[in-house]
Image: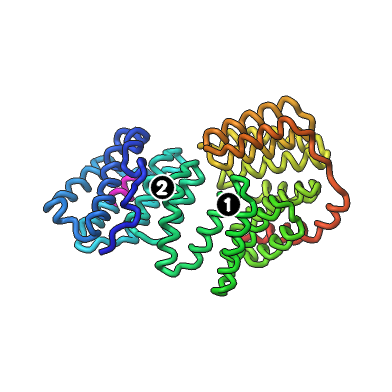
């Protein structure tokens, strides 16, 4: 049996101490025991657990997890915990089933802000089912919540497994993820090189659909950062075509395309698309909604619509209160909002949003966000809408709005 490639350096969260501190007392010990059980089973060869625990050992654990209390309505975390133990009682445990049960715990924990638990069980899923896609998922979650060292470790595992499995889609996504990290640190040319390699791999293996769309999408962001706006627009157009109608990534693409337009001084088309996003999308994800509000605040300020700016600024504060816990997206969002306040000469909000951006950047170990916040505070306001750019971008704006309408209807 294959030992987990993750077993060399498990994260502190996976070892369970943070889980015990975070969860309610009636659940904490059971969750900790299940995490330790998955690690032990994976490290000892992934076979039968009878030799590890003796006859009846796991049966007692299963009874302890379920207890006497009736199951709660909706999601009850005891169910996935019990599913892991029940499967490990079997002579040949089902690895995918154990991994899915661990991810059910992650899905349960995230909206309740049990962040340590969510991350620990995402990594436990990669322990249970050592494949590139589970390791990559765990890496993405760790990155999102500012656990950069663990994210780097998990990404390296995902890259190794993707090569071994010849899983080219995950291999491409690993390269794109590494490129995104370089973007965050201002290494734009290095980021672009990784993303170009990812796009070349798509073409080499004739991969289409979502993964091709993601490669073009990330290159849109890279070229925007490098200020090669025509190349960015070409990648945006290619991404819309690759994603196709109704794809869930289209709203994300529209948000980043609005960012490109604002960099060109076209705040009007950006505002139109961002308002469409707020009306129809991202209701399920408070963090994405926060990002969209922040961009819309900037676009409204740039287009000179003071009434819309004031309304969106108030709604942004509501979105910010709802977008907990803090992620790596919070700081950049508040930088965007601060640019809007700068353009609108709104000194009170500028000071507040710059302060929040710097605080979130420090909390998530993003020194580049802290520097961006300082830059907003000391640079003059950006120019208002460039009329020629508005006209030039209208065709792609109409195409994007049509795609968003199809996506909302899907």
Predominant SS of the magenta segment:
helix
Where residue 324 appears, as percent x and y from the top left, is: 52, 36
Determine which quarter of the picture holds residue 316. top right
Seen in the picture, residue 249 relative to 17 is either above or below; the reply is below
The secondary structure type at the circle numbered 2 is: helix
Seen in the picture, residue 316 relative to 230 is either above or below; the reply is above
In this view, the residue farthest toward the top is 348
Q: Is residue 82 magenta?
A: yes
Q: Is residue 19 magenta?
A: no
Q: Residue at x 37, y 34 (%)?
A: 22
In this view, the residue farthest toward the right is 387
Query: Which residue, given by chain and number where applicable, does mark 1 sit on?
Result: 180
The secondary structure type at the circle numbered 1 is: helix
Query: Which residue, given by chain and number where applicable, does mark 2 sit on?
Result: 106
Query: What whole-number distance in Å separates the C-alpha atoms at marks 1 and 2?
Result: 24 Å
- Please give the range of residues in magenta: 76-83
């Amino acid at each position: 049996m294959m030992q987990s490639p993750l077993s060399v350096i498990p994260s502190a969260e996976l070892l369970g101490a943070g889980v015990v501190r975070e969860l309610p007392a009636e659940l904490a010990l059971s969750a900790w025991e299940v995490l330790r059980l998955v690690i032990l089973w994976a490290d000892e060869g992934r076979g039968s657990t009878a030799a590890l625990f003796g006859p009846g050992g796991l049966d007692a654990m299963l009874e302890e997890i379920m207890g006497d209390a009736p199951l709660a309505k909706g999601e009850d975390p005891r169910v996935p915990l019990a599913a892991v133990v029940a499967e490990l009682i079997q002579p040949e445990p089902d690895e995918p089933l154990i991994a899915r049960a661990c991810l059910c715990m992650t899905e349960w924990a995230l909206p309740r802000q049990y962040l340590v638990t969510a991350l620990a069980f995402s990594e436990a899923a990669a322990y249970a089912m050592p494949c590139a896609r589970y390791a990559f998922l765990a890496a993405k979650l760790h990155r999102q919540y500012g656990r950069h060292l663990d994210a780097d470790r998990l990404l390296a595992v995902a890259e190794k497994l993707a090569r071994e499995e010849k899983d080219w889609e995950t291999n491409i996504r690993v390269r794109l993820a590494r490129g995104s990290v370089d973007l965050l640190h201002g290494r734009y040319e290095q980021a672009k090189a990784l993303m170009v390699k990812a796009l070349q791999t798509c073409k080499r293996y004739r991969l289409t659909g979502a993964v091709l769309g993601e490669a073009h999408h990330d290159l849109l962001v890279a070229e925007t950062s490098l200020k090669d706006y025509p190349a960015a627009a070409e990648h945006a157009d290619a991404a819309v075509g690759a994603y196709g109608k109704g794809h869930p990534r289209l709203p994300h693409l529209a948000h980043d395309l609005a960012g490109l337009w604002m960099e060109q001084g076209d705040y009007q088309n950006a505002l139109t698309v961002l308002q469409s996003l707020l009306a129809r999308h991202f209701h399920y994800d408070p963090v994405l909604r926060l990002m969209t509000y922040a961009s819309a605040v900037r676009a409204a300020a740039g287009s000179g619509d003071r009434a819309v700016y004031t309304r969106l600024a108030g709604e942004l504060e509501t979105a910010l209160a709802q977008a907990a816990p803090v992620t790596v997206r919070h700081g950049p969002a508040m930088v965007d909002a601060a640019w809007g306040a700068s353009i609108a000469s709104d000194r009170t909000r500028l000071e507040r949003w710059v302060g929040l951006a710097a605080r979130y950047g420090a909390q998530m170990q993003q020194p580049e966000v802290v520097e961006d916040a300082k830059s907003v505070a000391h640079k003059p306001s950006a120019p208002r809408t460039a009329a020629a750019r508005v006209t030039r971008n209208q065709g792609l704006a109409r195409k994007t709005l049509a795609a968003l309408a199809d996506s909302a209807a899907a």
